[in-house]
Image (spheres, helix red, strand yellow):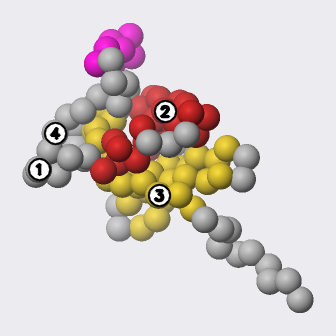
Amino acid sequence: MAYIPYNVNGKVNMSNLTNFDVIFYEERNGESPVYYFVYGLDNKMRAKMIGLLDVLAEQGNDLREPYSKYMGDGIYELRCKVGNNITRVLYFFYYGRKIILTNGFVKRRKRHQKKKL
């Protein structure tokens, strides 16, 4: 696992030392699927997701629905929606005020969509 700041330019905001560190999980070969997922999103979705990552860093485990949801087994999802497009990034908390982002996906349809008769 490697520390990769989510704000590509590498600048760290030292004004609030209570923030969590948001870390993109990195595989042994050096690749970070969640990093490529986030930065591969279209401009609007990427901007909103990066904004939500800022909010997550500030609020940590106090962030609740509709922005974050506990999925079970220590896994949470960061929930981002722009228009009808929905994306999710899965993460967990690690000691030392760290949040590890593991992977992301695009949600294709709503879970409880009513069938047309």
Magenta stretch prevailing secondary structure: loop
Q: CA distance from mark 1 to mark 2?
A: 25 Å
Q: Depth check: give the residue in front, 88 or 94.
A: 88
With 83 as the anchor, is 26 left or right in this view? left
Nearest to N terminus: mark 4 or mark 3 = 4
Q: Quadrant of residue 95?
A: top left
**Quick one: SS at disc 4?**
loop
Which of label 1 and label 2 is nearer to you? Answer: 1
Residue at image mark 2: 50
Are the residues at dot 3 and dot 1 in contact (C-beta closer than 8 Å)? no
* Residue extent of the magenta highlight: 10-17
Earlier in the chain: of badge 4 and badge 2, it is 4
- Give the x, y percent position of residue 59: 48, 34
| Quadrant location of the N terminus in the rendered image | top left
Indicate which disc, 3 or 2, sits on the residue closer to the N terminus: 2
The three-letter code of the residue at mark 3 reads Phe
Q: Amino acid at mark 4?
A: Ala
Q: CA distance from mark 1 to mark 4?
A: 11 Å
- The residue identified by callout 3 is 105
10 Å crowding of disc 4: few (<14), some (14-19), many (20+) = few
Residue placed under numbered mark 1 in the picture? 29
In primary-sequence order, the first of circles 1 and 2 is: 1
